[in-house]
Image (spheres, rainbow, N blue to C red):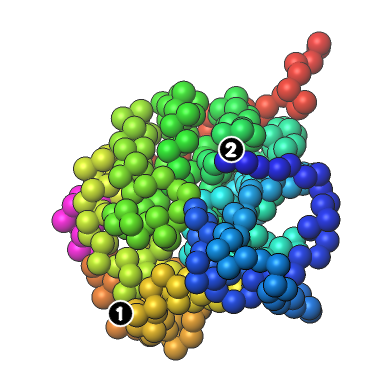
């Protein structure tokens, strides 16, 4: 896998226009999105046309991963959302090479002048100074610890992490300061960091959730092409649990008419792998994600596309998306209520209705600012 590192700002950052506004009937191998629509802040559009120089039998070049390094002003991202169980998170990367076509974080690429389509999974923004900034922020005299989320935006163990190691650096700071954290991933790369995570779990400092939306390997390959396979994720869950880390399975997203039939099977398989509890999130389609997902359906599931969108709209008050707090992750209406009941019944039957133990905040010790001890 080839990647190219570009300093920030890059020429591509200044003004990126959707270069593939229509779905590609022959999508790129290993990529999730089949289109690259212009972002919502763009005022121009560019449409590709054949100028006669492309041979009929020539294959288009595969889009390569480009890493764009962004200066880091702050490491901690804060939120006040009433339906999210944390108020702070750390995101070493923006954009995600896993290419999950349903990812609710795709529209965030618009703030960087990039498309939430193919750009999101091929132009990864990395923050190389994030560990140093986190150390400085945790060392501030007024800082008060509370569970910190890793994986709230994009997967911190996505493929580019193998080379850059930014998530590992963040974990080093959290382990040193004994700071509580929660993590969500669908990557087997998290197993690399079991030494740190197991040590922190022994002090009650870690919860882990593995995201699995289907057990259908072929469907997963289309929905989330560069993520670990569902079976591999279950083995990762097993290894995390065996290391003493309290684990959950996150069935997310539930896509009505596409992945919802697998709901109970995913929960049962995760229980057998060591999960103690389970949660779910209904598919969300904010901003440009509506078009990206619709384009994917038109290419990969043309016969069921209208049915999937009809079911989703019935769970979203007649719309493609609902951003209302308390409802955005669950939906409303008959089908949403049925989904919630299915999850509740399965949780009770499988013993996945328990709460994970509370994370310890009283073990926190501020890290040494700059990573160097004082002489006095």
Q: Percent x, y for residue 177?
A: 61, 28
Instruction: Tell me the CA gap for discs 2 and 1.
Output: 39 Å
Residue 286 in view (yes/no): no
Magenta span: chief secondary structure: helix
254 or 28, which lies in front?
28
Q: Percent x, y for residue 374?
A: 79, 15
Q: Percent x, y for residue 32?
A: 50, 60
Question: Which residue in the protein does label 2 denote?
Answer: 161
Q: Quadrant of residue 357?
A: top left
Q: Nearer the viewer, mark 2 or mark 1?
A: 2
Relative side of 355 to 142, left or right: left
* Residue 339 vertical position relative to residue 145 in the rendered view, above or below: below
| Magenta-highlighted residues | 344-353
**Secondary element at image label 1:** helix
In percent of the image, x 42 and y 42: which residue is there?
208
Question: Which residue in the protein does label 1 denote?
Answer: 335
Mark 1 Cα shell of 10 Å, populated few (<14), some (14-19), many (≥20): some
55 or 26, which lies in front?
55
Q: Which mark is residue 91?
A: none
Is residue 203 a member of the stretch shown in magenta? no
Q: Residue furthest left?
A: 349
Q: Quadrant of the N terminus?
A: top right
């Amino acid at each position: 896998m080839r990647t190219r590192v570009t300093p920030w700002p890059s020429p591509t950052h200044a003004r990126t226009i959707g270069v593939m506004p229509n779905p590609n009937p022959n999508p790129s191998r290993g990529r999730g999105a089949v289109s690259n629509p212009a972002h919502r802040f763009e005022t121009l559009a560019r449409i590709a046309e054949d100028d006669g120089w492309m041979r009929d039998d020539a294959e288009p070049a595969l889009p390569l991963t480009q890493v764009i390094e962004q200066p880091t002003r702050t490491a901690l991202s804060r939120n006040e959302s009433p339906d999210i169980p944390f108020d702070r998170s750390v995101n070493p990367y923006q954009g995600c090479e896993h290419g999950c076509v349903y990812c609710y974080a795709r529209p965030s690429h618009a703030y960087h002048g990039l498309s939430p389509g193919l750009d999101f999974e091929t132009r990864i923004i990395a923050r190389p100074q994030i560990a140093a900034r986190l150390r400085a922020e945790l060392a501030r005299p007024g800082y008060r610890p509370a569970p910190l989320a890793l994986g709230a935006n994009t997967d911190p163990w996505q493929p580019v992490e193998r080379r850059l190691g930014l998530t590992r650096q963040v974990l080093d700071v959290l382990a040193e300061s004994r700071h509580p954290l929660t993590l969500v991933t669908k990557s087997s790369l998290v197993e690399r960091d079991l030494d740190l995570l197991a040590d922190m779990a022994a002090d009650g400092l870690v919860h882990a959730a593995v995201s699995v939306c289907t057990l259908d390997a072929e469907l997963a390959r289309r929905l989330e092409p560069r993520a670990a396979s569902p079976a591999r994720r279950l083995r990762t869950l097993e290894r995390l649990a065996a290391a003493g880390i309290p684990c959950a399975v996150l069935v997310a997203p539930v896509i009505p008419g596409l992945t919802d039939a697998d709901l109970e099977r995913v929960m049962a398989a995760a229980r057998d792998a060591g999960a103690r509890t389970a949660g779910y999130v209904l598919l969300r389609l904010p901003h440009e994600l509506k078009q990206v997902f619709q384009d994917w359906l038109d290419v990969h599931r043309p016969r069921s596309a209208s049915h999937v969108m009809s079911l989703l709209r019935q769970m979203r008050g007649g719309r493609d998306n609902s951003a209302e707090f308390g409802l955005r992750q669950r939906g409303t209406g008959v089908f949403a209520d049925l989904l919630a009941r299915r999850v509740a019944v399965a949780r009770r039957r499988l013993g996945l209705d328990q709460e994970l133990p509370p994370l310890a905040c009283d073990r926190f010790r501020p890290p040494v600012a700059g990573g160097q001890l004082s002489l006095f």
